[in-house]
Amino acid sequence: MKHRFVTLAAATAACIGLTLALVPGISTAQDASLQPTVVDGVTGPDERFTSLVVVGRKNTYRRDGLYEAAFCGGTKVSARRIITAAHCVIDDNGRPLPAGKIIVGSTPSGELDATDAVVINVRSVKIHPQYNDDRATNDIAVLTLRTTLRGIPNVAIALPADDESLLAPGEPLISAGWGALRRNGTDYPNEYRVADVVAFPRGSCGRNAAYTVADVRFRGYPSSQANPRVMVCASGVSQDSIVDTCNGDSGGPLLGGTAENQRLVGVVSWGPPRCASKRPGVYTRVSAMTDFLADTGVPIPPIG
C-alpha cells in the first residue's frame, strides 16, 4: 500500500496528475514490463473539475508560491468546506496538522503558478474518527475555511443509494490533479491533468478478483489490503496505456454522474507502489462517510 501524496518534508511540491504506462502485449504483459510515459494533451482547465482545489503548506506558499506549497488535492463541497484525504493532514504521530499551517488554493486557469490563484486560510481540520493509517480505512477529512471560497461551484457528495448506478462495474469516472506524471512518482506538472477511469467490481477491491478493462487484465486486492465497504477501486486504459493517479494525487476527487448532476464518489487514497501498474488505484468511498460528513457541516443532498 502506498498513499498518493508528497510528504511535508519532501523537497519537491506534490502536485496531482495522472500517470500512463504503456502496455506492450496488453493483457499478457507483467507489471515489470510496463514503460512509463508522460501524459500529453490531457490537461486542464476542464469544465468537469471546477471544484478542484489545492491543499498546501502555508509557510512554503508565502515564501515560494502555490506550486512549491501544494502537497495534496481537495474538492469544494460548500462555501467553506473542502473534502480531502485524512493522510494528507496528519503529522508523523497521527495527529491532525494545525489548521494554521494549511492553506487551500483555487486556480481558475488550472496552473499552480498562475497570478489568478485564490488562497484561503484553514480554520479547522476534522479527520474521520475511525481513520486507520495502517489500513487506509476511512481516509477522509474535512477542512473548514476561514472565509468563503468564491468563484468556483460546489459538488454534491454521493449517497449510498447512488452506488448502484454511479459505481457499477465499468461505469465511467473521472479524477484530476497536479500529481506525478511518472510511475516512480516523479515529474510534477504546473497544469492539472485529467484521468478518465472506470469503476471496478467490489470483488476487485477486497476479494482479489481480477477485472479486464479494454483487454488489459488488472489484478485485485485481497481483504487484508482493501475493504470494498469503505473503498472504491478504479483505473483506466487509453490507447494501450494504463491511466492512474499517482504521488501527489491524494485527497483529490473521483467524480461520477453527468455534467448536470455530478457527484463526488471517491477521494484519492492509495495504490500500488508503482503507479499505473496492473492493480487499480484505491479511493475512499464517499457514500460510506455520510454520517461523518454531516457531522462536519458538509451538505447532504436529498434522496431521490
Image: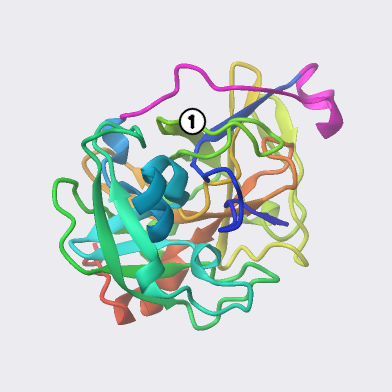
Specify few, some or many for label 1: CA neighbours under 10 Å numbering under 14, 14-19, or 20 or more.
many
For the record, the magenta segment spans: 24-45
As drawn, 271 above or below 259: below
* The stretch drawn in magenta includes residue 192: no
Residue that mark 1 sits on: 189
Q: Residue furthest front?
A: 63
Left or right position of 272 against 41: right
Looking at the image, residue 250 lies above or below residue 214? below
As drawn, 296 above or below 264: below
Classify 198 as above or below 134: above
Residue 198 location, x and y as percent?
53, 38
Q: Residue at image x 45%, y 17%? A: 41
- Residue type beneath disc 1: Pro
Q: Verify whether residue 28 appears in magenta.
A: yes
The answer to whether residue 177 is seen in the rendering is: yes
Query: Is disc 1 placed on a helix, strand or loop?
Result: loop
Residue at horizontal 35 percent and vertical 34 percent from the top: 113
Seen from the viewer's position, the closer of residues 242 and 90 is 90
**Res 259 → quadrant:** top left
Q: Quadrant of the N terminus?
A: bottom right
Task: Indicate the quadrant where residue 87 lies.
Answer: bottom right
Residue 174 picture location, percent across and down: 43, 39
Q: Residue at x 26, y 31 (%)?
A: 109
Frontmost residue, 6 versus 236: 6
Say which quarter of the image contains residue 226. bottom right
